[in-house]
Image: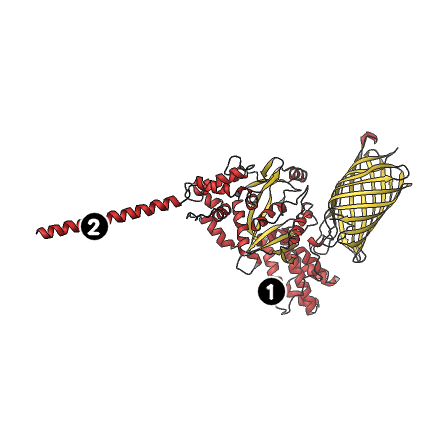
């Protein structure tokens, strides 16, 4: 019994010692583990030691730009920053981000690790810490749905009846493992507005009166919007980014959701802000640093190509473009039949009674189907009528058992980024009035009718910020010839299935004859009419209205109306001609008339140079002047 008691006691003591030893070892290991997990303060100090706030990637993620005296983010939404002075202090924003990501966790989607996924991924790598497990269902579901593997930069071309579209636009597509491009997701940056007044829209857009937001939409929705409703051709530029780089772009886009920046039409616009996403993929790309006083969307495409980021480019014509090319292949009788089909006056089952051969029937059915589709997009047909007509035409078409003709237009249009540069410098010499003169003109943007057409929408002109000065050799004087604030002309040819309106608007200063002397006169004019496709080019007629303001006029102004007619011809691949007649009768204020005839020719030398010859005969208030100038034009 004594032996048994001693055995139990000894056993109890041995177990107790073992438990003490195990507890000691466990406590020591836990203590060591706790000591190896860096505190927020230690991580902040490590970040400062590594100077992460000076890294290029940090500047890209926060959209910092160097300003006199420091840094400033181009993001204006205070909710984007974690530090009070985060907009102007990369250092304080870094410290606040470390504290938010590695401090006390917040459950749910309000967790900063779910909001700032790009910052979190980068800091985790740079600081060498293990990610704290967290659940972010919204982010994970969106990431899985988009599946960003490759990226494409999309440039919607201009649309003749929309002045804003003449500048172009850019989108960024994310493609996953699926094959169809329609299933991609498009990242877009645009101004948020419901403004319907064109003047107010322009004024606010120029002065930063709108907020710009990033958005993510299915690409098929943007195709429908641009290619259909707005009738804009699309150019798609596949980018040389790896899946990892594409994912980094998407992470940055996620951080920018619901975050606004002041939108500026000329510089901090749709295209410029998308460049931050590309820089997030490769921080060494200085895509946002080259910007000057203005950023044209097509210039950003050229910038991307300059850094060899474009793997290939593909063209997607709009419905209106396809219809125009299809209709050009019809003769007059086929055109009438296709019109009746599109209007629902003729049924597909009655087509065999028209006497058309099989190939003629196929051409007619293809055109009619496209015309019905365009009518629906223009809201000239309701959904029920559209479905009924479209299905009936397609049913007849399928019974022909013959493939449609290839309407991919060869030679394919010149890529917009391969056209001439947006800015232009012109040096000229010639005869004006009764003297030999030299002229220097400079244009900020964008394209004139006589400029080389390759890469631009035929019949479109939009010039802004054009200044011209002349040197009179006989008098030894320098005069301001004029300033074009804006000069837009949109010539969209009509056809049997579509009748877009051609129009123009212009405003600025020009030196012209008045009743007593030549003066600088302020002018504002507009016109509306129609254009048609001729053998050599576009013909047009416009009804014009024009107003002048100058203190030497009777009552200091003149208002009148009239008409103009012209022809724009592409004589050869490099030779263009534009002839124009215009007459305006002023009936309010100074009452008189203005008549002019202009003949211009241009010869393209290469994408950056051209020669132009401009002749004009003008009569203002009874005074006639003749001018002839030869220019060398340089584009960039």
Q: Position of residue 607 (x, y in %)?
A: 75, 53
Q: Position of residue 296 (x, y in %)?
A: 67, 46
Name the residue nearer the viewer: 569 or 133. 133
Q: Residue at x 55, y 42 (%)?
A: 54
Q: Visible in this render: residue 79?
A: no
Upstream in sequence: badge 1 or badge 2:
2
Q: How is the image coloured?
A: secondary structure
Q: How many marks?
A: 2
- In the image, which disc is placed on residue 15? 2
**Based on the displayed image, in which of its 4 quarters is residue 324 positioned?**
bottom right
- The relative height of residue 108 versus residue 238 in the rendered view (above or below) is above
* Separation (CA) of disc 1 from disc 2: 90 Å
How packed is label 1: few (under 14 Cα within 10 Å), some, or many (20 or more)? Answer: few
Q: Visible in this render: residue 171?
A: yes
Q: Residue at x 74, y 55 (%)?
A: 454
- The relative height of residue 503 versus residue 235 in the rendered view (above or below) is above
Left/right placement of residue 374 relative to residue 553 reads: left
Name the residue nearer the viewer: 552 or 572. 572
**Based on the displayed image, in which of its 4 quarters is residue 513 positioned?**
top right
Q: Position of residue 221 (x, y in %)?
A: 57, 52
- In the image, which disc is placed on residue 395? 1
Left/right placement of residue 2 relative to residue 101 reads: left
Q: Secondary structure at mark 1?
A: helix
Q: Position of residue 354 (x, y in %)?
A: 70, 66
How packed is label 2: few (under 14 Cα within 10 Å), some, or many (20 or more)? Answer: few
């Amino acid at each position: 019994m004594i032996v048994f008691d001693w055995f139990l006691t000894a056993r109890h003591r041995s177990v107790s010692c073992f438990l003490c030893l195990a507890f000691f070892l466990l406590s020591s290991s836990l203590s060591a583990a706790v000591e190896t997990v860096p505190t927020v303060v230690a991580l902040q100090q490590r970040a400062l030691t590594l100077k992460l706030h000076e890294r290029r990637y940090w500047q890209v993620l926060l959209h910092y730009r160097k300003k006199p005296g420091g840094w400033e983010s181009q993001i204006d939404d205070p909710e984007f920053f974690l530090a009070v002075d985060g907009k102007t202090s990369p250092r304080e924003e870094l410290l606040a981000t470390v504290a938010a990501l590695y401090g006390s966790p917040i459950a749910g989607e309000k967790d900063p690790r779910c909001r700032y996924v790009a910052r979190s991924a980068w800091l985790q790598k740079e600081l060498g810490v293990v990610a704290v497990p967290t659940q972010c269902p919204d982010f994970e579901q969106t990431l899985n749905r988009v599946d960003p593997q490759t990226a494409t930069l999309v440039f919607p071309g201009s649309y003749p009846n929309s002045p804003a579209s003449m500048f172009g636009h850019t989108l960024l597509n994310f493609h996953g493992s699926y094959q169809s491009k329609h299933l991609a997701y498009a990242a877009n940056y645009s101004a948020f507005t419901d403004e319907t007044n064109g003047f107010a829209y322009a004024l606010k857009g120029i002065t930063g009166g709108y907020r710009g937001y990033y958005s993510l939409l299915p690409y098929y929705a943007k195709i429908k919007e641009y290619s259909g409703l707005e009738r804009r051709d699309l150019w798609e530029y596949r980018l040389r980014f790896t899946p990892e780089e594409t994912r980094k772009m998407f992470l940055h886009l996620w951080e920018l959701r619901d975050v606004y920046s002041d939108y500026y039409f000329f510089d901090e616009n749709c295209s410029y802000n998308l460049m931050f996403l590309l820089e997030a993929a490769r921080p060494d790309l200085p895509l946002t640093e080259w910007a000057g006083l203005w950023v044209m969307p097509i210039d950003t495409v050229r910038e991307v190509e300059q850094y060899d980021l474009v793997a290939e480019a593909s063209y997607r014509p709009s419905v209106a473009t396809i219809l125009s090319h299809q209709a050009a292949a019809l003769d007059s009788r086929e055109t009438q039949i296709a019109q009746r089909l599109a209007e629902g006056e003729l049924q597909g089952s009655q087509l065999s009674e028209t006497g058309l051969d099989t190939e003629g029937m196929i051409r007619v059915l293809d055109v009619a189907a496209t015309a019905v589709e365009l009518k629906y997009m223009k809201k000239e047909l309701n959904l029920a009528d559209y479905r009924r007509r479209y299905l009936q035409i397609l049913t007849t078409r399928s019974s022909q058992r013959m493939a449609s003709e290839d309407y991919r237009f060869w030679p394919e249009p010149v890529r917009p980024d391969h056209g001439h540069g947006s800015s232009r410098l012109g040096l000229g010499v010639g005869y004006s009035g009764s003297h030999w003169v030299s002229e220097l003109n400079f244009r900020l943007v964008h394209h004139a009718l006589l400029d080389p057409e390759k890469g631009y929408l035929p019949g479109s002109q939009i010039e802004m910020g054009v200044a011209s000065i002349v040197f009179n050799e006989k008098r030894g004087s320098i005069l301001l010839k004029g300033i074009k604030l804006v000069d837009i002309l949109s010539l969209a040819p009509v056809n049997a299935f579509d009748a877009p309106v051609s129009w123009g608007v212009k405003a600025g200063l020009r030196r012209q004859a008045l009743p007593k002397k030549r003066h600088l006169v302020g002018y504002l004019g507009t016109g509306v009419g129609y254009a048609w496709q001729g053998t050599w080019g576009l013909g047009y007629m416009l009804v014009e209205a024009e107003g002048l303001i100058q203190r030497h006029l009777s009552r200091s102004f003149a208002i009148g109306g009239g008409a103009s007619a012209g022809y724009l011809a592409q004589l050869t691949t490099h030779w263009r001609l534009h002839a124009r007649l215009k007459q305006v009768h002023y009936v309010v204020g100074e009452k008189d008339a203005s008549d002019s005839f202009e003949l211009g020719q241009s010869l393209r030398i290469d994408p950056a140079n051209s020669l132009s010859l401009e002749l004009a005969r003008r009569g203002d208030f009874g005074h006639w002047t003749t001018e002839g100038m030869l220019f060398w034009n340089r584009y960039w």
